[in-house]
Amino acid sequence: MDVTFTTSPSSKQSLSQAQHREWVKDLFIPKAAIFWTDLLLSATIGWVAFIIAYLVKPFSILQGGTLLVAAIAFYRALVFIHELTHLKENALPKFKLCWNLLVGIPLLLPSFTYTGVHADHHRLSTYGTAQDPEYMPFAGKKGEILFFVAHSLLLPGLLALRFLVLAPIGLLVPSLHHLLERHGSSLSMNLAYCRKISNAERNQIKITEIILLGIWSIPISLAALGILSWRIFVIWYVMMALIMCTNTLRTLGAHRYGSDGTSMNLEQQLQDSVDTPGKFWTVLWAPVGLRYHALHHYFPSMPYHNLPIAYQRLRQNLPLDSYYHHTTSPNLWTSLKQLWNEQPRGQIK
């Protein structure tokens, strides 16, 4: 499909977000029981599987299987970082703290790497521009696509370098820490993205780094004393590489990446985004609502557990020529193939 964005004045095709919001107005309240059960179950499965993968015979089928289970469970738990960015303050008390302790800090992805960044991806003035941390004009650019996928295998090592090596130095050298704040504290695919840090965010980053170093010093010390095998860090790296690679492919299928670098209105942003309801296994590579990515861009504050219901309501009520019907892809492979074969765009019409 050609990546062309239009702003037709047709009453059938134009988007009326206020009217559509009326159809789903009952779906914006997060259900604490679902959030907590999902997170705790995912994290528990992830930790149990990870421990088993460490204890069993190396390179055995059992180790491979449990490592895969750990990657799937931790991937789902990690993706809650996306929900954290859209939850209202105090909507789920202590949820962010619990998430950081159970998942974010052990996997070297504390919440500040996303919660202070993701808003720039949704903002109409920055989406698809050089100020968007989660966007690159990938359409048809095969070399950039391959590099983006390949670099995901190095991300666990870069995270370890950032938080376990540079962070303690940065806490002592302010100039280095300021550099890390701007260019090393954001989950961003756009290397040109420069994060703006407030004093409150700076303090949060420093406190989180100190806690992270304290927690990570335990397994590192145990390994240095010979109580733990250094193999545990290799298992961690392989698991994280699987998670990062899966998320990279998922990210490539989340948008059409046809921007020319100028800002888009809501209708154009929706046309550039993709829903992939898929089959039941779709939740393995796009967990916690990420398979409804276009819908999420339309209603960013809607909790993940209500997105399938909202998707069905919009599909049933919108006319067949509505742009929203064209946001749906049958599967990830179709989206990736379209992105790969697309001709690089010159402009947004």
Image (cartoon, rainbow, N blue to C red):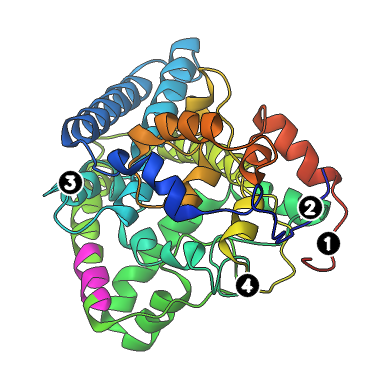
Say the numbered circle drawn on residue 278.
none
Say the numbered circle drawn on residue 3.
2
State if disc 1 and disc 2 touch (CB < 8 Å). Answer: yes
Work out whether residue 191 or residue 161 is closer to the camera in this orientation and state it: 191
Work out whether residue 62 or residue 288 is closer to the camera in this orientation and state it: 288
Look at label 3 and name its amino acid: Phe
Look at label 2 and name its amino acid: Val
Q: Secondary structure at mark 2?
A: loop
Residue receiving disc 4: 263
Quarter that holds the C terminus = bottom right
Predominant secondary structure in magenta? helix
Q: Quadrant of residue 102?
A: top left
For label 3, the crowd category at 10 Å Cα-Cα, with few meaning under 14, some 14 to 19 and many 20 or more, is some
Let me know if residue 174 appears in the view.
yes
State if disc 3 and disc 4 touch (CB < 8 Å). Answer: no
State if disc 3 and disc 1 touch (CB < 8 Å). Answer: no
Residue receiving disc 1: 345
Residue receiving disc 3: 95
